[in-house]
Image: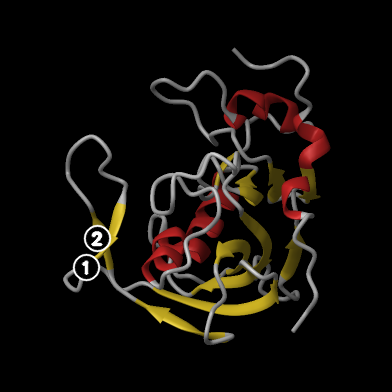
Amino acid sequence: MADPLFNIQTHLLYRDSMMLVLNKPAGIAVHSGAKKNDSLDKYFEELKFGLPRLPALAHRLDKDTSGCLVLGRHPEALRRLGHLFQRNQIQKTYWAIVNGILSEKEGAIDLPLAPQSTKKYHWWMKVDPQGKSAITHFKVLSETTKTSWLELKPQTGRTHQLRVHCAAIGHPILGDRIYGEDDLNFNNLHLHAYSLEIPLYQKKDSILITAPAPNYLEKYPINFL
């Protein structure tokens, strides 16, 4: 059942004739499925804004990831956005709080990924030399004595890429119950889709959308290095 108190329009970051961009809350799946009591797509009726069709997802974010989520408003928009996402022509920037202090403050993680299994949790991933190419560019924005605030820019778009890559270099994202430590001190995955740069219109500049970080990241203030 959709929550009647949830107002999806308050999460709208951007709107034009082609697309909508939401600041997705953490903890809600983007689409309905087995064992999902609530999902964002149940609220899309409120995002028609006069058009006859419901908007539809142009890409996905994990249930526990917050931030920029793009919807196409009609089939042509979805076709164009899908083309851009599939060819990695949309620049995506994420923020993550990870465990530990990185020895290198900027660089790239180049580790191919493959599914852990073909069984129940087939979308869980692992580093595998025989897997598909996966590259993530990272930069340390700030540090505490025990954590680092990273800017992550995926060059490729593999499932769980950022989560697996951070864990693989020994710095799992806080609150990651799959690839990190099962630490009950963290109720949220500390991963936020901070910005998208979308070259949607050929004769116009790319559209830059940013999403304010959720409250649970605010206790890690950015003191740029």
Secondary structure of the residue carrying numbered label 1:
loop
Label 2 amino acid?
A: Ala
- Please provide percent x and percent y for residue 209: 75, 61
Q: Which residue is mark 1?
A: 128
Q: Which residue is mark 2?
A: 114
- Please provide percent x and percent y for residue 97: 62, 61
Residue lying at the far front of the rendered structure: 145
Q: Is residue 17 left or right of residue 27?
A: right
Residue lying at the far right of the rendered structure: 10
Colouring mode (rainbow / by chain / secondary structure / one colour): secondary structure
Q: Quadrant of the N terminus?
A: top right
Residue 214 versus residue 224 in the image, above or below:
above
**Can residue 212 be seen by looking at this rendering?**
no
Q: Quadrant of residue 24?
A: top right
Circle 2 crowding by C-alpha within 10 Å: few under 14, some 14–19, many from 20: many
Q: Quadrant of the C terminus?
A: bottom right
Whether pointer 1 and pointer 2 mark residues with C-beta atoms closer than 8 Å, the reply is yes
Which one is nearer the viewer's eye here, 220 or 165? Answer: 220
- Please provide percent x and percent y for residue 137: 51, 79
Q: Residue at x 72, y 76 (%)?
A: 203
